[in-house]
Image (spheres, rainbow, N blue to C red):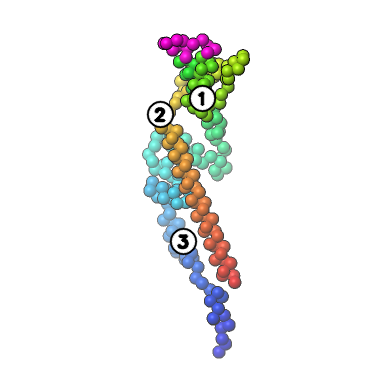
Amino acid sequence: MRRNFFSNRPWRRKVADPSFVGPQTVLRELQRRELSDLETCRHVWEQGADPLALCAAVTHAKLPEWLTSALLVMLTDRAGGWPSMPVKKWWRQRTQRAIDGVRAAHVAACRIHPEGPQTWESSFLLANELARKDHKAIPSVARFDNPPKISGIKRSYQKVQRGLVDPCRFYHAPNGTNERILLAQVYTLGVMRSSLKATQVGTAKAKRSTQTSDL
């Protein structure tokens, strides 16, 4: 009887792959794994960062049709060959209008202050400093130079004056909205990093397993 040369060499023995499943299990699992409710969507998003889970969650959330459509379009930006939506352009335009609105509000407040209305020039200068004090992200365009450079603040005020004829411009969100957006960004970034780390660990384990079995 021929002796098995490798019988006492465990590193040469074939080890069953724990990740192997039969075709019946494959088919059953694929049929079962449907993003059929919010809880499933939450789990798949938090554990796997699957963007389709977000899209399915939006459809399950019973939101107004206009909000559902807008969110789905933004979530699928450039996916599946769809053209890119100008989301960055929208936010750039919205940020500039917000800056103009803050500056214009301070200019108007200085002009009609009950304890001492300011001249236009003084109002523009004060508005620049007050806007920067309220929102440090707003760039300063006027300094107490000689002569004072107030054209940027004046331009912001004039844009708001003309733009107020549009009933959909210069809105601001309730207090706490920006903080909520920041929390959402931190949370979502954490989910995406965890998913990426898990994927990298799984790939590394699979590579080591393949190298071991080849020895």
- Seen as rendered, the residue at the extreme right is 146
- The stretch of residues the image draws in magenta is 110-122
- Check if mark 1's residue and mark 3's residue have beta carbons within 8 Å: no
Q: Position of residue 195 (x, y in %)?
A: 49, 51
From the viewer's perspective, is the residue at label 1 or at label 2 nearer? Answer: 1
Packing grade of label 3 (10 A; few <14, some 14-19, many >=20) is few
Report the amino acid beneath label 2: Pro
User: Which residue is pictured at 51% across the width and 53% down the height?
Assistant: 197
> Left or right of 212: which side holds 188?
left
Q: Nearer the viewer, residue 128 or 99?
A: 128
Q: Quadrant of residue 153?
A: top right
Q: Would you say residue 63 sits in the magenta stretch?
A: no
Packing grade of label 1 (10 A; few <14, some 14-19, many >=20) is some
- Magenta stretch secondary structure, dominant: loop
Residue carrying label 1? 132
Count of labels in the image:
3
Residue carrying label 3? 26
Residue carrying label 2? 174
